[in-house]
Amino acid sequence: MPGQIRQRRTDCGLWVFVNELLEVARRDQLFKKYDFDPDGNSRWQEVFKNPMDAYKAYDLSKTSVSITKNRYPGPWGDNEADAFRHAHWSYRMAKELGVNGAKSFSDAHERYTKGNFFRRTVMDLHNNQVGRQLYLQYGNTGASATDIVSGNIGRLITSPYDRP
């Protein structure tokens, strides 16, 4: 599917370096925006706290991965497929576990992912938040999570510099 998410070109190495410096300066500000505590519960702490919900979250993640693979058969990584997967999984978790449960598990997932660079964390936090917001907005309409997230793809980002 052709992407509708805007991506910024990074032809200039200096531009990228300056933005990386700005990312460090804005780290706490952006984490606050997404109400994200980088030192919060780990995945395992969430599993022990809510084992049944953890199993549901895991099962929902597998379903979201499968749906995403069918919609976006190409490579993943900081693209529309990755953004869709995060929003879809968060939407489905909000429906099954409640919005707070969805946030707890998705935040723990972002803390766990080793090598998840700051910019990827910001993108994922944004797209997770959009998924929960979409559930709150459309969760009782009877439409599928896939249709709702697809219909709102322009709200997702693939770069922390995007402005949906």
Image (tube, rainbow, N blue to C red):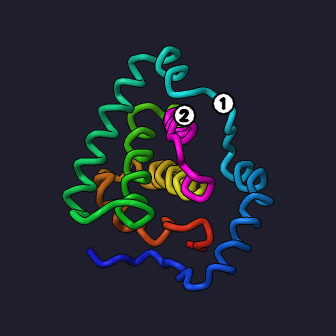
Over which residues does the magenta segment extend? 102-121
Estimate how packed mark 1 is, as few (under 14), some (14 to 19) or many (20 or more) residues with alpha carbons within 10 Å.
few
Q: Main secondary structure of the magenta part?
A: helix
On-image quarter of the N terminus? bottom left
**Which SS class for mark 1?**
loop
**Towards the viewer: 161 or 105:** 161
Figure check: 30 above or below 36: below
Of the numbered discs in the image, which one, if any, rests on residue 40? 1
- Seen at 60% across and 59% down, the residue is 119
Q: Position of residue 72 (x, y in %)?
A: 25, 64
Q: What residue did someone put label 2 on?
A: 108
Q: Are marks 1 and 2 in contact (CB under 8 Å)?
A: yes
Of the numbered discs in the image, which one, if any, rests on residue 68? none
Mark 1 vs mark 2: which is more N-terminal? 1
Asked where in the image residue 60 lies, by quadrant, the reply is: top left
Q: Is residue 104 left or right of residue 69?
A: right
**Which SS class for mark 2?**
helix
Q: Position of residue 27 (x, y in %)?
A: 74, 54
Magenta stretch: includes residue 118: yes
Figure check: 157 above or below 132: below
- Seen at 24% across and 52% down, the residue is 67
- Seen at 69% across and 32% down, the residue is 39
Estimate how packed mark 2 is, as few (under 14), some (14 to 19) or many (20 or more) residues with alpha carbons within 10 Å.
many
Q: Position of residue 31 (x, y in %)?
A: 70, 49
Dot 1 amino acid type: Gly
Dot 2 amino acid type: Ala
